[in-house]
Image: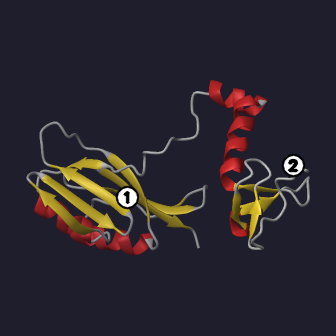
Amino acid sequence: MSDDRSTASTRTDHLRCGCCGQARARSRLAELGDTPGTFICTRCALWAAGRIARSSRLGKLRRRLPHRHPRPGVLTAVPVLAATDLDRTAELYSAAGFDVTGRHDGYLVLHAGPVELHFAQDQETTPGACYFHVTDVATVRERLEAMVAGSTGPLGDTDYGLREFWFTDPDGNRVRFGSPVS
C-alpha cells in the first residue's frame, strides 16, 4: 500500500495534506511549486516556514540584530502634548480637522480619521512636537493662521517632496503639517 498523503480523499473538494495527512478543503491547501500534485495545508506551511527561518543563515542573522520585526501587541503611537486650556486647544485643533472624541479630568482626546492626538493639562507634561500628513496643507495653514496670527511658519516645498509648515500652539507645542507636492 502506497503512503501517498497528497492523493484526493473520498470527497473531490477535499485533499490530504502532504505533510500531516489531514483531509482539508482544497481552498485551504497550496500546491507545492517544486512538486506538482503535492499539496500542503496552511498550518504545515507556517510550521515549515518557522523551521526554515530558525535554521537558515538569515534567521540566525535576524536574531542578532537589535531591531527585529515588531511583535504583536503594538497597534499605534499617540502623541500626548501639553495644554493649559483644553477648551482653547479643542477649538484650535478643530481648525486643523480634528474632532473631540473624549474628555476627562484634565485630559483631551482628538481624532481625525484614524489619527489620534491627546492633550494633558498637568504640570509634568512639557511642550512637545509631532508631524501630521494631511491632504491639503495650504488650507490647514490658512485656518490655523486665522485663529492664532503669527503662530505659523512659512509654507514651503522640501527636497524630500513635501509641502509643509510648522505651527506653534499657545502651549508651546511645535506641530508640523505636510502634504505631497502636486
Pointer 1 residue: 153
Q: Is residue 177 among what the camera can see? A: yes
The residue lying at 72 percent from left, 43 percent from top is: 49
Residue type, mark 1 in image = Gly
Left or right: residue 97 compared with residue 90: right
Q: Position of residue 68 (x, y in %)?
A: 58, 35
Query: Is the residue 52 above or below the residue 77 in the image?
Result: above
Q: Badge 1 local density, few (<14 within 10 Å), some, or many (20+)?
A: some
Farthest residue to the left: give it.
105
The mark that comes first in sequence, 1 or 2, is: 2
Residue in the foreground of this view, choosing between 48 and 62: 48
Residue in the foreground of this view, choosing between 152 and 139: 139
Quarter of the image with the C terminus in it: bottom right
Q: Position of residue 180 (x, y in %)?
A: 55, 67
What's the distance in space between the residues labelled 1 and 2, CA to CA? 74 Å
Q: Name the element at disc 2.
A: loop
Marks 1 & 2, CB-CB < 8 Å contact: no
Q: Badge 2 local density, few (<14 within 10 Å), some, or many (20+)?
A: few
The residue lying at 87 percent from left, 53 percent from top is: 4
The residue lying at 18 percent from left, 57 percent from top is: 108
Left or right: residue 137 compared with residue 121: right
Hey, which quadrant is residue 69 in on the image? top right
Pointer 2 residue: 3
Q: Position of residue 10 (x, y in %)?
A: 77, 69
Farthest residue to the front: give it.
1
Left or right: residue 156 compared with residue 110: right
Q: Position of residue 52 (x, y in %)?
A: 75, 37
Q: Name the element at disc 1.
A: loop
